[in-house]
Image (cartoon, grey):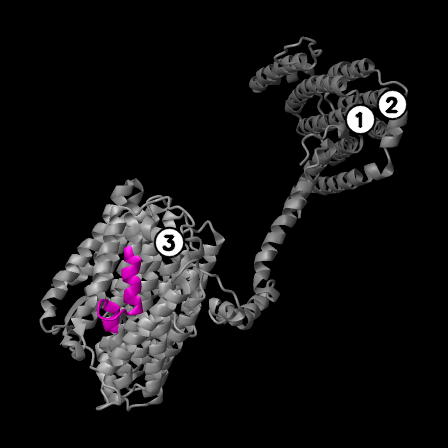
Amino acid sequence: MADLLLSHGLILAVLLFGAGLLVVLSRRNLMYILMGIEIMLNATGLVFVLGGARWGQPDGQVLFILVLTVAAAEVAVGLALVLQMYRQRETIDADAMRELRE
Amino acid sequence: MTTACYIAAAIALLATGAVLFSRNTVHGLLYLVVSLFAVAVLFYTIGAPLAAALEIIIYAGAIMVLFIFVVMMLNLGERSEHRERQWLRPRTWFGPAVLSAALLAELIYVIGALPQGTAGSSMGARLVGATTFGPYVLAVELSGILLLAALVGALHLGQQPREEETSSHG
Amino acid sequence: MTVLLALIPALPLAGFAILALAGGVLPRRGIGTVAVGAVLLSALAAAICVIPMLGGGQGVTTVDLWHWVVVPGLKADMALRLDALSAVMIGVITGVGLLIHIYSATFMAEEHGYRRYFAYLNLFTASMLILVLADNLLMLYMGWELVGLCSYLLIGFGYEAPDNGRAARKAFVVTRVGDAAMAVGLFLLVAQFGTLNIAAIMDQAQLQWAAGQPLAIAVTLLLLAGAVGKSAQLPLQTWLPDAMAGPTPVSALIHAATMVTAGVYLIARTHSLYELAPPVQTLVAIIGAATLLLSAFSALAQRDIKRILAYSTISQIGYMFLALGVGAYSAALFHFMTHAFFKALLFLAAGVVIMALDDEHDIFRMGDLRRRLPGAFWGFLAGGASLAALPLITAGFYSKDLILSDAFRSQAGSGWLWAAGVLGAFLTSIYIFRPLFIAFGGEAKTTPQRRATRPELFAIAVLSVLSVIGGLVEIPSALGGYHGFSAFLHATLPAVPVAGETALGEGTLMLISAAVVLAGLGVAWWRFGTGAAVEHDNALLRLWGEGWGFDRVYDLFLVKPYVWLARIDRRDVVDLPYTLIAAAARTLHRGLSATQTGRLRWYAASIAGGAVIIIAIGVL
């Protein structure tokens, strides 16, 4: 098996997380925002697996499976919402929904 | 093996960066799929083959496909590329970049303080399955309920709006 | 006896408390019953206390209620003192007060604030009784301030009209000037004698002070300022004509019979101090004489029937001050008593007229009320005759004549003061018969809508009788000589120091004053009684009508500079903390509102930012 330093793996996870955050914050297209959330969830799962591999226990992978489940549920609902918004507004611009402003 | 690790990591990073700057939605999705594959390879190299498999099957194979379905359904057309270019200006991502950089810096600083080293054993599906339905069986049941809720929610939220005169909720 | 004495002010006070706290549940009849009942019982108690004293006027009763102020340097108790002087006062206050309460029961029946009115009226009665029964000057000052408060509350009774509020404020502020001076006088007394007990002060003053001592002059001058303010004499008389904005029974009780005589009471009570400061006593007489003349001229030029009576009140109190100034204390108190009768009567009759003509005050719009409102007519006739001091048949004649003869014959008096009084009597006769002829004679201008009710007529009838026979307690020697009143007061107040033989004897003086009064009646008949009343207007009448321009002078030299100063000091340093707090709140609000943009990415960024900050706090 590979000899990967834990800190290097975590740095990768952190970088992926940061990239996902960047995607969420700087794109206006709702699909891209959902993609960015997926990237962040993936990075989180990576942290779990790395942790399990470090200590030699399968618990990391088990938690990764749960993270995957959560991501699937969230994607399903999120995409349904995107569809609904497109039907009502003819756009998927995140900035177009501002009714909750002060 | 170790080099494969680092190469996979590099590919994951580059693909994710490409998602960030892509203008076509489908291109972005495909880049994301590449990133997921790279992460799956990484999983395999550190001894988590089940995780690698599940990453590909569920994440890249189901979730991303869902994304592509929806993009196809929306059928945004030619104007989307032009619009994306307009929306992604440097001044748009400068602030978030600063924010993310700050977050990254902090986390990396924290990671530097952790103990080093990694074990090398490979944990197969049987071991993972035993652990899942052993100590973590409650979490499994809960995630089942979560999926049920997501299913019902997505079904309801994705409905076509009713055209009747008197509709209680649509 | 002691309990009865304490009940006299306590009963109206209880009436006030009941009406204020529980009066909301009482019907109109109940409210009237409580109020009138309280004063009725108080009057009975007063009668029981006073009647045993009538034999010789002796007998001073003191009731110590409780220790009030006990500090090093001053010890003041809540204590009541009943002697001849306060007996006269409580007799008038409770008697006339009772009649006015009865009158008000039906007069104010349509008012929205019926309960409030009677609560204040009871409180006023209690305060006035506290004032006159007080054993020490601190308690007297408390009563003094309370009557001022009640005056403010009752003048401004109809607070929805801003004019009423302005009149109430003016009354309060002008009397405040006098009250502040009086307080300084009290401070001087405490510093000098260490006590405010009236009897103690008067004894000690006679021992410690020589006549004409500067401290005596200062103290009496300051107390005089307080009396001048409360009794509406020169130069603080400007508030009384405007105070007519209040309901007519209020004008009758407070601004004719009782509160405005508090100054007279104060000077009479502290007469020993004034005897030790002869210049100030002369000043009292001069103020009285000047006031009585100036306001008599003003009364001639008024159109509003209540303002005529207001200026008349100022003038008659001027007579009382004149009497006090020459040392004729009994005469002053005698005139106080008769004035309470006929002035209250005049106001009550005027009230009936005003209500009957639907709130009409202008005498030139009234006519022939002699036939249409007979009750008011006879009451006004009796009161007016008594005010003018029609010879022999009215109470006012005896009291005014006593003042005039004492002014002439007293050691401290002078011919000039007497002449001023005589001229005043002439003008009085004219200015009171003028509205009588104009409003009650002549041709009808408006039809009365409302007749006088039984309680109102009852009060008017009783006061009419008193205005006619009330003078018989003090008949001058030239007519037979019965000095019951001054004998009664002799126990407390010294008699007039008569300066031996004088140029004119008592009988001659009486004939002169009688002639003058009848001459005034003749003039009034000639100008106003025959045919239609002619309204005049020239510069002199206008000057008199405005009260000799005092209001304008005060406004120019006192009010305007003060208001200007207040305006330029609108935003000063002291306001800064408050405005800064408000500005800070507004800025925070604007800042926080700006964070609610409704944009998804903004909120996500704020979550990320929060995470950054929290991790930074944990890491660093």
* Residue B104 pos. (x, y %): 75, 39
Under circle 2, the secondary element is helix
Q: Which mark is residue A29?
A: 1
Position of C30 with respect to C352 (left or right) is left
The answer for how far apart the CA atoms under marks 3 and 2 are is: 83 Å
To which quarter of the image does residue A15 belong?
Answer: top right
Marks 2 and 1: CB-CB under 8 Å? yes
Near mark 3 (Cα within 10 A), the count class, few <14, some 14-19 or many ≥20, is some
Q: Which residue is mark 2?
A: B80
The one of B121 and C493 positioned closer to us in this rendering: C493
User: Which range is magenta?
Assistant: C378-399
The disc label shown at residue C247, or none: 3
User: From mark 3 to mark 1, how far is it between C-alphas?
Assistant: 78 Å
- State the CA–CA distance, disc 2 to disc 1: 9 Å
Q: Position of residue C87 (x, y in %)?
A: 18, 68
Left or right of residue C487: residue C313: right
Question: Which secondary structure, mark 1?
Answer: loop
Residue A24 seen = yes
Q: Is residue C480 left or right of residue C25?
A: left
- B6 is higher (above) or lower (below) than C400: above
Inspect the image, locate mark 2, and give the three-letter code of the amino acid beneath it: Ser
Q: Are marks 3 and 1 on the same chain?
A: no
Comparing labels 3 and 1, the label whose residue is closer to the camera? 3
Locate the C terminus of chain A and report the quarter of the image it occupies.
top right
Closer to the camera, C485 or C386?
Answer: C386
Which chain letter goes with mark 3?
C
Helix, strand or loop status at disc 3 = loop
Q: Is residue C386 magenta?
A: yes
Looking at this view, is C522 or C553 the one in front? C522
Question: Is C602 within the magenta?
Answer: no
Report the magenta stretch's main SS: helix
